[in-house]
């Protein structure tokens, strides 16, 4: 992703734009010249030199019953590897459910890798970090959903 400050001075037109990286075509993005955001955000496509893997951790994921309450824990492990030959600034985002029902609660577990930003109203966690060439980092997202026994949720 790229964010462009002062983009309104460029007299851009709305529409599709081709994206090239290091002289190679990597895809298309859309320029929204009618945007009211301070920065223009463009998707630049996938960098094949950065590998990301997300997998469910079975030893953490479980359901338990306490009285009239069901507690389900979900855990995911994200592994990021910088296969580039230069350092890179990474922004990793993941999401967790947000409840609109007062009898259903969702909370991040203390086992979650501390995020740089946690937007609880949207259920989005963000980790921002610098990675050296050939470096690998892992991140855990663990959340707990509590709800009344007998209630059926699609989790």
Image (cartoon, rainbow, N blue to C red):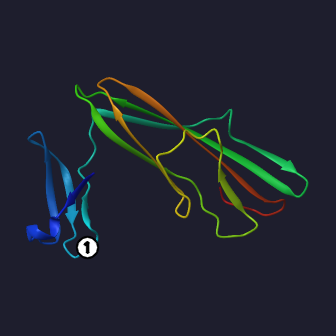
Q: Position of residue 5 (x, y in %)?
A: 20, 61
Q: Residue tagged by mark 1?
A: 35
User: Quadrant location of residue 148?
Assistant: bottom right
Question: Is the residue 41 above or below the residue 35 in the image?
Answer: above
Q: Quick one: quadrant of the C terminus?
A: bottom right
- In percent of width and height, residue 70 lies at 80, 53
- Count of number-bearing discs: 1
- In the rendered image, residue 81, in percent from the top left (x then y), is placed at 37, 29
For the point 65% across and 35% down, the residue is 58
Q: Quadrant of residue 41?
A: bottom left
| Structural crowding at the residue carrying mark 1, measured as other residues with C-alpha within 10 Å and reported as few (<14), some (14–19) or many (≥20) | few
Q: Residue at x 16, y 72 (%)?
A: 14
Q: Nearer the viewer, residue 113 or 31?
A: 113
Image-based side of 56 in relation to 70, left or right: left
Looking at the image, the residue that sits furthest to the right is: 67
28 sits to left or right of 50: left
């Amino acid at each position: 992703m790229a964010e462009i400050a002062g983009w309104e001075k460029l007299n851009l037109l709305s529409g599709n734009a081709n994206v090239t990286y290091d002289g190679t075509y990597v895809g298309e993005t859309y320029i929204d010249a009618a945007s009211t955001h301070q920065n223009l955000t463009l998707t630049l496509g996938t960098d094949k030199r950065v590998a990301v893997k997300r997998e469910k951790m079975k030893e953490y994921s479980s359901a338990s019953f306490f009285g009239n309450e069901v507690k389900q824990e979900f855990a995911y492990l994200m592994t990021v590897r910088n296969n580039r030959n230069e350092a890179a600034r990474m922004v990793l985002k993941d999401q967790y459910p947000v409840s609109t029902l007062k009898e259903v609660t969702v909370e991040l577990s203390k086992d979650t890798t501390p995020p740089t930003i946690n937007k609880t109203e949207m259920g989005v966690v963000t980790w921002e970090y610098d990675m050296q060439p050939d470096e690998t980092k892992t991140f855990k997202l663990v959340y707990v959903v509590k709800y009344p026994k007998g209630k059926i949720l699609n989790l």
